[in-house]
Image: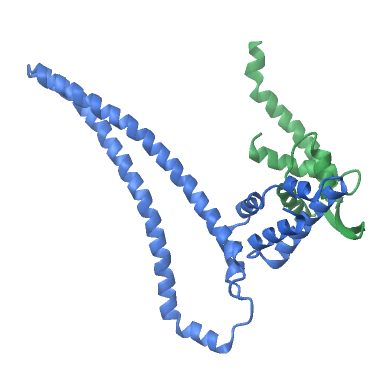
Chain colours: A green, B blue
């Protein structure tokens, strides 16, 4: 997939992974595995970007005698997901436009 | 490679990054390895799944702007002593021109490499022009009633055209290589700046 397109999608994917319940790095990677393979370094960058955009907050919670970082979606993050739903309609419309010739051949 | 070895290698390669930034990444990778081990993988397997340190470092390098690395690198680790500041100011007429000239030399080297490439393009263009002239020559010789000359013109045109086409592909190949090389030099520069950040502590 095109890198630019993928980058935008990945941000939304990570938000979706923590939408229902706070999650941590490895769990996010595991949840996304059936849909797309995400490397640790890529995930780190996305989490940082989302954190500085105030779309998620980070809490260190003790687990088995060590600290684990849990990521919690903020209202702004939820709003971004809603916004993406609208974006997607636009993308679908563009998709339809791009392939309109093809369908008329059939 | 076990967990501590992996993290130590990562720390060494990232030691030129801002301290807090580096620590945060180390904590992140430590958690990733520990969660995998908890999930039933052995320590070695967990580390292997994270991928080679080199790959991680080069990805981090490609994301961080060069200016930020240089800023961190240039920042003194301790406060400068008074005599050092005095020396810096007094020495300014000396070190500043030296710094500028070192930079200028490097820049001109880089420009030279590109100039060579431009020359090759020019040679290629001349060959193409030669081919065109050869074809034009055929008609001139024919009009002058000199078939041997026309054959010579055709031969010369074909030779020039062939060389021009071959050289054109070589040019494209060299240009691509040079662009890729530039990217690699930039990444290499960043890596070397970040890699040995502790040598003047």
Nearer to the camera, A83 or B104? B104
B26 or B1, which is in the foreground?
A: B1
Give the residue at x 59% y 66%. Answer: B196
Q: Is residue B38 left or right of residue A33?
A: right
Percent coordinates x, y for residue A104 in the rendering: 65, 13
Q: In the image, what residue occupies the spot 63% across and 56% down?
A: B64
Return the residue nearer the eye: B189 or B100.
B189
Residue A81 can be seen, yes or no: no
Residue at 33% x, 35% y: name it.
B167
Percent position of residue A66, x then y: 88, 60
> Does the image show residue B40?
yes
Instruction: Look at the picture and state if B157 lies above or below A69.
Output: above
Q: Position of residue B53 (x, y in %)?
A: 66, 52
User: Residue A94, located in which quarter of the rendered image?
Assistant: top right
Of residue B54 and residue A86, the one placed in the foreground of this image is B54
Quarter of the figure that contains the C terminus of chain B: bottom right
Question: Horizontal placement of B157 versus A87: left or right?
Answer: left
Report the residue at 24% width, 24% height from top: B158
Residue B67 x, y percent position in the rendering: 57, 62
């Amino acid at each position: 997939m095109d890198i630019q397109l993928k980058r935008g999608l990945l941000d939304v994917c990570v938000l979706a992974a923590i939408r229902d319940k706070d999650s941590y790095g490895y769990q996010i990677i595991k949840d996304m595995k059936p849909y797309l393979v995400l490397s640790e370094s890529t995930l780190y960058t996305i989490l940082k970007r989302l954190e500085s955009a105030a779309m998620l907050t980070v809490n260190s919670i003790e687990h088995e005698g060590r600290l684990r970082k849990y990521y919690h979606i903020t209202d702004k993050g939820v709003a971004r997901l809603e916004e993406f739903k609208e974006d997607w309609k636009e993308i679908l419309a563009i998709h339809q436009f791009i392939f309109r010739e093809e369908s008329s051949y059939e | 490679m076990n967990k501590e070895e992996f993290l130590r290698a990562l720390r060494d390669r990232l030691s030129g990054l801002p301290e807090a930034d580096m620590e945060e990444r180390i904590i992140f990778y430590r958690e990733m390895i520990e969660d995998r081990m908890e999930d039933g993988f052995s320590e070695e397997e967990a580390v292997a799944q994270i991928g080679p340190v080199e790959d991680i470092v080069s990805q981090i390098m490609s994301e961080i702007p060069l200016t930020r690395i240089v800023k961190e690198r240039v920042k003194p680790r301790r406060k400068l002593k008074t005599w050092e500041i005095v020396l810096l100011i007094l020495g300014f007429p000396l070190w500043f021109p030296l710094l500028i000239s070192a930079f200028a030399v490097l820049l001109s080297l880089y420009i030279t490499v590109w100039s060579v490439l431009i020359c090759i393009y020019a040679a290629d263009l001349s060959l193409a022009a030669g081919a065109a002239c050869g074809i034009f020559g055929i008609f001139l010789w024919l009009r002058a009633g000199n078939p041997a000359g026309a054959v010579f013109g055709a031969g010369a045109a074909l030779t020039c055209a062939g060389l021009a086409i071959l050289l054109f592909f070589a040019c494209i190949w060299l240009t691509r290589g040079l662009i890729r090389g530039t990217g690699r030099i930039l990444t290499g520069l960043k890596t070397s700046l970040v890699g040995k950040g502790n040598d003047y502590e």
